[in-house]
Image: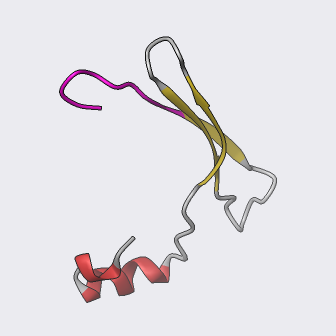
């Protein structure tokens, strides 16, 4: 994220929470429809490290948008 695009007060507030972006663990591309599937490892809460979680996100391209 480019910090210059956000107000400095908001950047400072976000920093207080120790934001950690998700990590893409796996990417799959569909040859059929051009869809892209991402397996994302979500950050573990420091208070409950055993609660690691993954999520799947799908980008579905269309003619005028994705």
In this rendering, the answer to whether 31 lies above or below 11 is above
| Camera-side residue of 15 and 57 | 57
In the displayed structure image, the side of residue 35 where residue 29 appears, left or right: right
- Outermost residue on the top side: it is 32
- Outermost residue on the right side: it is 50
Question: Which residue range is magenta in the image?
Answer: 57-66
- Outermost residue on the front side: it is 31
| Camera-side residue of 28 and 39 | 28
In this rendering, the answer to whether 29 lies above or below 23 is above
**Residue visible at 55% across and 77% down in the picture:** 18
Within the image, what quadrant is residue 40 found in? Answer: top right
User: Which color scheme did the rendering employ for the protein?
Assistant: secondary structure
Magenta stretch, overall SS: loop
**Residue visible at 24% across and 76% down in the picture:** 5
In this rendering, the answer to whether 21 lies above or below 19 is above
Q: Is residue 63 magenta?
A: yes
- Outermost residue on the left side: it is 64
| Camera-side residue of 10 and 24 | 24
x, y percent for residue 27: 62, 37
Quadrant, the N terminus: bottom left
User: How many numbered discs, if any?
Assistant: 0
In this rendering, the answer to whether 25 lies above or below 14 is above
x, y percent for residue 55: 60, 38
Q: Is residue 37 magenta?
A: no
In the displayed structure image, the side of residue 46 where residue 15 appears, left or right: left
In the displayed structure image, the side of residue 44 where residue 16 appears, left or right: left
**Residue visible at 69% across and 44% down in the picture:** 53
x, y percent for residue 20: 57, 68
Within the image, what quadrant is residue 28 found in? Answer: top right
Within the image, what quadrant is residue 26 found in? Answer: top right
**Residue visible at 30% across and 32% down in the picture:** 66
x, y percent for residue 13: 37, 82
């Amino acid at each position: 994220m480019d910090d210059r695009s956000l107000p400095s007060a908001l950047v400072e507030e976000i920093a207080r929470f120790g934001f950690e972006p998700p990590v893409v663990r796996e990417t799959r591309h569909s040859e059929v429809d051009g869809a892209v599937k991402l397996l994302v490892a979500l950050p573990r809460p420091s208070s409950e490290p055993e609660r690691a979680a993954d999520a799947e996100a799908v980008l579905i391209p269309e003619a005028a948008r994705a």
